Image (cartoon, grey):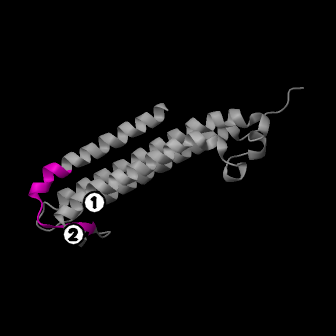
Amino acid sequence: MASLKSAVFIHTLLIGLLALEVVIYYPKLPDTVASHFGASGQADGWMSKQAFAALAIVFPVALSTLLIAVQASTVYLDRLPAGLINMPNKKYWLAPERRAETMAYMGPLVSRMMLRAGGLSMALIVIIMGLALHANLQPEPRLEYAWPVVVTFLGLILITAVRDIVQVYRRFGRIPQPEV
């Protein structure tokens, strides 16, 4: 549960920072703002500043709600049928006599995985929205520094995913040998 409270805190903080940024930049934005940028950073989609400001808040709030709901649902992980669970040596670890202990370990682990992935995803959205707001303050809107942000995000996601997979394989990768 601590991890869920952390998720709510992190998402609320990030959305709050984005809302503050929208409030600060909104009066300075032109009536029509760039809302989509191509791979080169060049603006290629436009909308009213009112619609953009609404999107900048509504989309992260909706995504955050979804991510937190998925994380909260990890408390029901033990109710999933074995066929929907992917883990090493599944038949052994999900046998009736070991399933409760396995799920007691996996539930918090999956919740922490969701905390990291959700927090990083929200940070990416907030940073990109902030860059888009800043770009619209320029005479020729151009999204600068988006690629380094996205590559850093993907690198962090990859590192955390590998870490989590290693943790699962360390715990469940081998079946204990019976003592003789």
Q: How far is disc 1 from disc 2 in space, using C-alphas?
A: 10 Å
Residue at horizontal 36%, vertical 36%? 9
Taking 54 as reference, is 29 left or right? left
Q: Between disc 1 and disc 2, whose residue precedes? A: 2
Furthest residue toward right? 180
x 24%, y 53%: residue: 130
Q: Nearer the viewer, residue 110 or 53?
A: 53
At x 74%, y 41%, the residue is 94
Magenta region, residue range: 22-36
**Which disc number belongs to residue 47?**
2
Name which residue type carries label 2. Met
* Residue at image location 49% in from the left, 50% down from the top: 158
The reply to whether callout 1 and callout 2 are in contact (CB within 8 Å) is yes
Q: Which residue is mark 1?
A: 55
Q: Determine whether, in the image, residue 108 is placed left or right of residue 82.
A: left
- Front residue of 27/163: it is 27
Residue 96: in sight, yes or no?
yes
> Does residue 29 show up magenta in the picture?
yes
Is residue 118 rendered to the left or right of residue 31? Answer: right
